[in-house]
Image: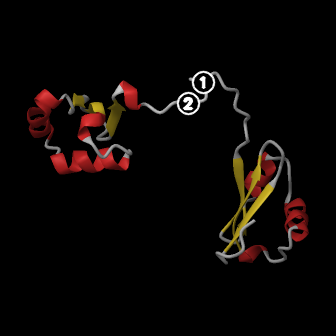
Amino acid sequence: MGTQLFLLNIAKLYINLRKSRYSLAELLSNLRTAGYPDIQDIEYAILEANGEISILPKKELIPITPKDLHMKVKYNGLPIAVVIEGKVQKHNLKLINKNEEWLKQELKAKGYHQIKEIFYASVRDTNHSLTVNTKDVNDQS
């Protein structure tokens, strides 16, 4: 495994890109994908040993988080997939101490009678609320 290389230190950008055989077009594409369309907004871009690029924006552009504002944020829970493309995910039901019969009852209560018609359904691990997405784009609950 190789070593990391600092691509973006603007003064050495050309030299470092040539050394890494990484094109400027690739770097700019990665910056845009990460939400930074302007190269001037970047403090460092690091070509990691695994080939990925780590992007560190300038301090004034780092997004503010609830922690920065000393706000408490409620944990909404993790959505556990229980139906994927019409197939019940039995292992995931076990993770939340539920079974296929419980799932069928919950789906029926929401008006869904055919599991094979469900594209994706998930259950929150905190309150066991069920979210269903069907193959019909107009029917989402």
Horizontal side, residue 107 vs residue 26: left or right: right
Residue 16 horizontal/vertical position (percent) = 13, 33
Horizontal side, residue 114 vs residue 72: left or right: right
Which quadrant of the structure image shows residue 104? bottom right
Dot 2 falls on a residue whose secondary structure is loop
Which quadrant of the structure image shows residue 17? top left
Q: Which labelled disc corresponds to residue 69?
A: 1
Which quadrant is the N terminus positioned in? Answer: top left
Residue 31 horizontal/vertical position (percent) = 30, 44
Q: Residue at x 74, y 53 (%)?
A: 91
Residue 32 horizontal/vertical position (percent) = 32, 48
The amino acid on which the numbered mark 1 sits, given as a three-letter code, is Leu
**How far apart, in angstroms, are the residues tagged by discs 1 and 2?**
7 Å
Q: Residue at x 22, y 30 (%)?
A: 5
Residue 120 visible to an observer of this rendering: yes
**Dot 1: within a 10 Å radius of its alpha carbon, few (fewer than 14), some, or many (20 or more) residues?**
few
The amino acid on which the numbered mark 2 sits, given as a three-letter code, is Thr
Q: Which labelled disc corresponds to residue 65?
A: 2
Q: How many marks?
A: 2
Is residue 106 positioned above or below 39 on the image? below
Horizontal side, residue 77 vs residue 43: left or right: right
- Contact, CB < 8 Å: mark 1 with mark 2? yes
Dot 1 falls on a residue whose secondary structure is loop
Relative depth, front residue between 112 and 94: 112
